[in-house]
């Protein structure tokens, strides 16, 4: 069915529509990041973390409203289970007296009857210095990837792969900003995994495009047709690989619990948009930049050409 839609002008039109959609999503993600930012977790901000259970099932909104009456600062309450909750307080908003007030309230209330499991201060593991180093490392990695792709492919295919990689990261960050999902160290680790997965997907498609461009019998075909044929020949492999990986990540998402939920969401999103970008960006952008079979013609010097022309 998908091969049918990738035939001829239909496939080219779909690829360009997908690229336009990607551009719109990137702009929306950047806008969301600028307006709302990321909801950094305790790994980045530090603060007080308290876990407690209730003797009976309590609605999250009701419990949050009750704690707010006995808490003077800002806090974030999340449900880890039916009767298992986690309360996070920023360092500037939390004091020992303040923590004791709300803890006493929830433990002494007969309807809640909470039991505090743990209460501890978590220091910030990363800060401004790590952000600076992370940005420099990301920039260095992108340069290294660009050099590798430039050596392996023609520069147009290399640019397409790098743009697809940046697209995937921005969309994942935009989703986390839009939904205000906690951004912690496990999510940061998933971004590194997404970089590798997205790059691998783009290389598979780009390698097939290069192979078809080098076939002399394909010189009569347009670059759009060659790219469509390359995508069709790798589509089954891409869908099987992505599908099995998504099934594994979905299992982690549904069964591993709250601690790995952000990791699974980021990786699941990254795999989906990475598969999409390898077709609509990594393979389409080089066409817009003028990729053709002439870019892979073997050029010989005058002496070699003379020898080839000899009877």
Image: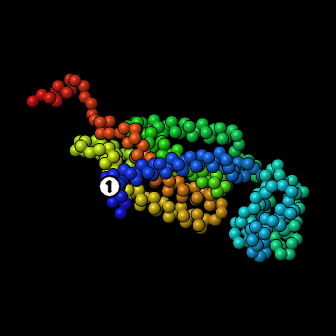
Give the left or right position of residue 193, taking residue 94 as reference.
left
Q: Position of residue 304 (x, y in %)?
A: 21, 26
The residue that mark 1 highlights is 7
Identity of the residue furthest to the top in this view: 303
Total numbered badges shown on the rendered structure: 1
**Residue 21 in sight:** yes
Could you tell me which residue is drawn at 45 percent across and 58 percent down?
242
Q: Position of residue 117 (x, y in %)?
A: 78, 65
Could you tell me which residue is drawn at 29 percent across and 36 percent down?
294
Give the left or right position of residue 197, taking residue 296 as reference.
right
Q: Position of residue 292 (x, y in %)?
A: 32, 39
Using the image as rendered, state which of residue 66 and residue 13 is in the foreground: 13
Dot 1 lies on which element? loop
The residue carrying pointer 1 sits among few (fewer than 14), some (14 to 19) or many (20 or more) residues within 10 Å by Cα, namely some
Q: How is the image coloured?
A: rainbow
Which part of the image, by quadrant, shows the N terminus? bottom left
Q: Position of residue 158 (x, y in %)?
A: 43, 39
Using the image as rendered, state which of residue 34 and residue 206 is in the foreground: 34
Give the left or right position of residue 307, taking residue 112 as reference.
left
Using the image as rendered, state which of residue 291 and residue 189 is in the foreground: 291
**Residue 152 in sight:** no
Could you tell me which residue is drawn at 53 percent across and 54 percent down?
270
Give the left or right position of residue 218, taking residue 157 as reference.
left
Could you tell me which residue is drawn at 25 percent across and 42 percent down?
219
Residue 132, above or below 225: above
Q: Quadrant of residue 84?
A: bottom right
Residue 127, above or below 260: above
Which part of the image, by quadrant, shows the C terminus? top left
């Amino acid at each position: 069915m998908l091969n049918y839609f990738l035939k001829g002008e239909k496939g080219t039109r779909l690829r360009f529509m997908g690229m336009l959609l990607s551009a719109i999503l990137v702009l929306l993600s950047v806008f969301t990041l600028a307006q709302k930012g990321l909801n950094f977790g305790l790994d980045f901000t530090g603060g007080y973390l308290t876990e407690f259970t209730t003797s009976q099932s309590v609605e999250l909104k009701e419990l949050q409203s009750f704690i707010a009456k006995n808490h003077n600062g800002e806090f974030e309450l999340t449900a880890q289970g039916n009767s298992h909750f986690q309360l996070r307080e920023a360092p500037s908003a939390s004091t020992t007296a303040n923590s004791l007030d709300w803890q006493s309230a929830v433990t002494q209330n007969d309807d809640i009857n909470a039991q505090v499991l743990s209460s501890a201060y978590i220091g910030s593991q990363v800060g401004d210095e790590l952000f600076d180093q992370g940005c420099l490392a990301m920039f260095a990695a992108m340069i290294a990837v660009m050099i590798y792709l430039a050596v392996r492919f023609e520069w147009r295919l290399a640019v397409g792969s790098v743009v697809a990689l940046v697209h995937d990261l921005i969309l994942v960050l935009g989703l986390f900003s839009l939904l205000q999902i906690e951004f912690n160290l496990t999510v940061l680790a998933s971004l590194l995994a997404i970089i590798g997965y997205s790059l691998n997907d783009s290389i598979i498609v780009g390698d097939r495009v290069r192979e078809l461009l080098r076939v002399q019998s394909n010189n009569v075909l347009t670059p759009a047709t060659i790219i469509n044929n390359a995508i069709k020949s790798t589509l089954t492999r891409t869908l099987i690989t992505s599908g099995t990986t998504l099934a594994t990540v979905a299992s982690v998402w549904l069964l591993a619990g709250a601690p790995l939920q952000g990791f699974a969401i980021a990786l699941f999103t990254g795999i989906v948009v990475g598969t999409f970008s390898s077709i609509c960006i990594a393979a389409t952008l080089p066409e817009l930049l003028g990729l053709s079979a002439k870019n892979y013609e073997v050029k010989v010097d005058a002496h070699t050409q003379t020898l080839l022309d000899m009877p």
